[in-house]
Image (cartoon, rainbow, N blue to C red):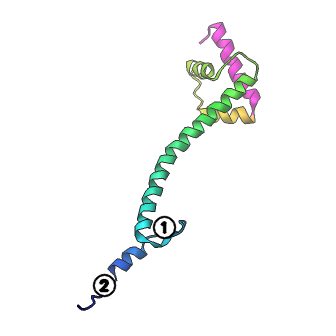
Amino acid sequence: MTRTKRGYIARRRRKKLFALNFRGAHIKNARAVIQQKKRSLFSAHRDRDRQKRNFRRLWIIRINAAIRESGVCYSYSRLIHDLYKRQLLFNRKILAQISISNRNCLYMISNENINNSIGGNP
């Protein structure tokens, strides 16, 4: 039986696979490259959501630690509830940055909320 010569189409298809940062067979073998790219895209999509979740948890921990350190009988949940009640719409990222850089400002915000909640002024 005579040998059939394959064209350049399969070689061109495999050559355009771009896998620069992988190791081992994941950089040379076309099937392994395709599988690894699918897996990496899935992990990247999953971890984008996980990263948002982790940062929100970190901000909440920082705010809670700063509030409890002040010595006032106050917690994170009460602070957020009072901020919403007073219609002061800070997001948690900004509150965490304030708690790190300028604690006096956070203490003033929390004390203002305490005084207003005790006094009954909305």
Residue at (48, 57) in percent of width and height: 40
Q: Quadrant of residue 62?
A: top right
Residue at (47, 73) in percent of width and height: 28
Please, what secondary structure does the residue beneath circle 2 have?
loop
Q: Badge 1: few (under 14), some or many (20 or more) residues near its Cα, within 10 Å?
A: some
Q: Disc 2 marks which residue?
A: 6
Q: Of residues 108 and 59, which is closer to you in this image?
A: 59
The amino acid type found where label 2 is placed reads: Arg
Residue at (71, 18) in percent of width and height: 111
Q: Quadrant of residue 64?
A: top right
Magenta region, residue range: 102-122
Q: First in sequence: mark 1 or mark 2?
A: 2
User: Which quadrant holds the N terminus?
Assistant: bottom left
User: Which quadrant holds the C terminus?
Assistant: top right
In the displayed structure, would residue 38 be above or below residue 33?
above
Residue at (59, 24) in percent of width and height: 88
The amino acid type found where label 1 is placed reads: His
Q: Badge 2: few (under 14), some or many (20 or more) residues near its Cα, within 10 Å?
A: few
Please, what secondary structure does the residue beneath circle 1 have?
helix
Q: Which mark is residue 106?
A: none
Q: Main secondary structure of the magenta part?
A: helix
Considering every residue shown, the one lying at the far left of the view is 1
Q: Label 1 vs label 2: CA separation?
A: 24 Å
Is residue 120 covered in magenta? yes
Q: Of residues 112 and 51, which is closer to you in this image?
A: 51
Q: Percent from the top left, x then y, of residue 23?
A: 54, 67
Is residue 114 toward the left or the right of residue 44 in the image? right
Q: Of residues 2 and 16, which is closer to you in this image?
A: 2
Q: Percent from the top left, x then y, of residue 109?
A: 69, 23
Q: Which mark is residue 26?
A: 1
Q: Percent from the top left, x then y, of residue 9?
A: 33, 79
Is residue 119 covered in magenta? yes
